[in-house]
Image (cartoon, rainbow, N blue to C red):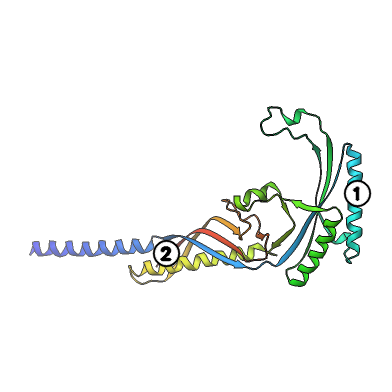
Amino acid sequence: MIRKSALLLALVFALAGAAYSQEQKAKQPLTFQVIGQAESMPEVITLHFAVIGDDESLAKAQEQLEQAEKSVFTALEGLDVKRDEFKMDQFSIKPLQPNLGYSSQVNPTSIPAIGYRAQRSYSFSQPANMQAMEKLIKIADAALGNGARPASISDDMLAGMSYGDRQSSILLEFTLRDPDILLKKAIDNAVTRAYGLAEEASKQMAKCPLHLVSFQLHNTSCKSQMWSSMSNSDCIQASSYAWQPITMTVNAEVGFTCE
């Protein structure tokens, strides 16, 4: 009788242990590494150009710049575009150093400047449509035909470009009004993919509702065929140098509990 009671008690403990183990497994988060993506066509087209004045004297370089700006914006008035519609993005004055070549051991900063460059960069934005594109092409043609140049790309943007697509200047840029909207769609896509994986995993346990308990974004990237930012930080800018879809990709870790 005692032996039967002991066996029965051992069976009860075994069943209780199995139930406890199953319960603990159900409470442990189901964690998945997933990639989410979202895509959107550009919403804004921006024309970028720079006006430059070069001279041996800094004061004369500034005068050359002002004369060049007058020539450019006078030409643009013929297209019914006023100067105050353009945004000035940057003003810089740089010393011009002689080209010593890569093999030279001389520090360029130890050589006196041979002149100075005064430069202002401007941008002009329009909604992304064919009518706006035609207008911007005419503006670009008039500006470049009167001494303007495509604007220089910043070091941050240059670092974000793939090696094969790197270029030193920009004329037309295609962007989104609010990249955070595309980011949210990419995150929602990641969560949806993770939920599908969690449903499959939960079939191995007792059927129970899934609850989202954790979400960690590892990195984001905004990319198109011509531009990409693959840094581990947030997406710098959702933009492209071509009128084509902009794709945002997120790499995330998503956790669910099954209770």
What x and y, as percent, mark residue 51?
Answer: 84, 51
Q: Which mark is residue 257?
A: 2
Question: Label 2 is placed on what type of residue?
Answer: Thr
**Quarter location, residue 227:** bottom right
* Residue 73 is at least partly visible in this image: yes
Left or right, residue 194 beside residue 136: left
Q: Is residue 162 visible?
A: no
Q: Position of residue 89 (x, y in %)?
A: 79, 53
Residue displayed at 89% across by 37% down: 57
Residue at position x 67%, y 48% in the image: 156
Image quadrant assignment for residue 176: bottom right
Residues at marks 2 and 1, CA–CA distance in whole angstroms? 65 Å
Q: Secondary structure at mark 2?
A: strand
Q: Which residue is mark 1?
A: 66
First along the sequence among labels 2 and 1: 1
Q: Amino acid at mark 1?
A: Glu
Drawn side of residue 238 relative to residue 36, left or right: right
